[in-house]
Image (cartoon, rainbow, N blue to C red):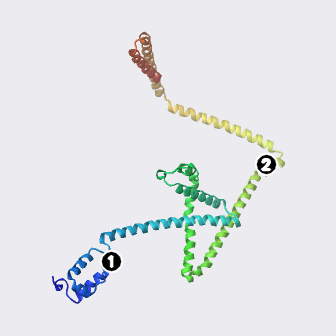
Amino acid sequence: MASGDFCSPGEGMEILQQVCSKQLPPCNLSKEDLLQNPYFSKLLLTLSQHVDESGLSLTLAKEQAQAWKEVQLHKTTWLRSEILHGVLQELLVDYYVKIQDTNVTSEDKKFHETLEQWLLVTELMRLLGPSQEREIPPLLGMEKADLLELMPRSEDFVWMRARLQQEVEEQLKKKCFTLLCYYDPSSEVLVGEQQQCQDAKSQQKEQMLLLEKKSATYSQVLLRCPTLLRRLLQEHQLKTQSELDHINAQYLEVKCSAMILKLRMEEVQILSDTYTVEKVEVHRLIRDCLEGAIHLQEQDLEKSRQVLNSYEVLGEEFDRLVKEYTVLKQATENKR
């Protein structure tokens, strides 16, 4: 095959050279090399249709791209978990630094203690690893079931998790703002507003502490008020108090008697409306029928008892008669 049959001089060679240089960079062929070796040029052109710019086959390149995508996904997931773990650790560190200087509310204390307990147990469970993949005995003979007993109470954990999202968002906002100020110094004008916001939050927490203290004081005062009122009543009781109490007692006694009579009347009225003459007659007929049926059942029971006495030595036949006797006795009890 002549070189002109494969590609024409000029622009064709330039295109072929660009393809080879782009997809087969190790070749580094010139136009003269391509013109002198037309079959090799054709081989390179055919080969370029099955490889990418890095020299890998299209299949391997696709698999490599998928692998890199999975690596990036796992890396992103790992970084996300590491960042979240770091934020949670910083929350605990900030809390323990804060309690050295100021008092904290009971809710803050409960939240951070529950968070710390959950983090410690989770970290220990991660260190133990899956029990089915462990060939050596676990550390100190502990299993995950032993650690689960150390988890916070379910209601405390649910309450902590509901607040945790807000706390993590606040911590991440602080970090994002720090990065923003580093890369864009003009945004430092927001520092003053952020400081004001922090001061307002600190004042709010101080007010909450003060409110809790005042609430406790008010509760103690309110508990003392009934005692003081009782003491005032005892010391300054009116002379006519006993007469008034006697009159009130008589009034209440009469009122109670009237209420009892009214309730009795209502009861009698309900009974008279419920059990008319016709209903009473029907109930009497039903009772007579039931008593007759009970009498017949008692006769059958007596006959069965006599049969049992005469056949108690018959073995299996005796067992059958016992069952029949039991059925008849049960039917008698039900009708009674």
Q: Position of residue 254 (x, y in %)?
A: 69, 37
Residue plotted at (54% across, 34% down): 270
Between 259 and 91, the one lying in front of the other is 91
Q: Position of residue 203 (x, y in %)?
A: 67, 69
Circle number at residue 33? none
Give the SS element for disc 2: helix
Residue for badge 1: 53
Horizontal arrangement in the rendering, residue 102 relative to residue 315 (left or right): right
Crowding at dot 2, Cα within 10 Å, few <14 / some 14-19 / many 20+, comes out as few
Q: Position of residue 258 (x, y in %)?
A: 65, 37
Residue plotted at (79% across, 48% down): 230
Q: Earlier in the sequence, mark 1 or mark 2?
A: 1
Asked if 315 appears above or below 25 in the picture, the reply is above
Amino acid beneath label 1? Glu
Asked if 194 appears above or below 140 in the picture, the reply is below
Circle number at residue 230? 2
Residue plotted at (40% across, 12% down): 314
Amino acid beneath label 2? Arg
Q: Position of residue 118 (x, y in %)?
A: 57, 57
Crowding at dot 1, Cα within 10 Å, few <14 / some 14-19 / many 20+, comes out as some
Between 153 and 4, the one lying in front of the other is 4
Residue found farthest to the top: 310
Between 36 and 261, the one lying in front of the other is 36
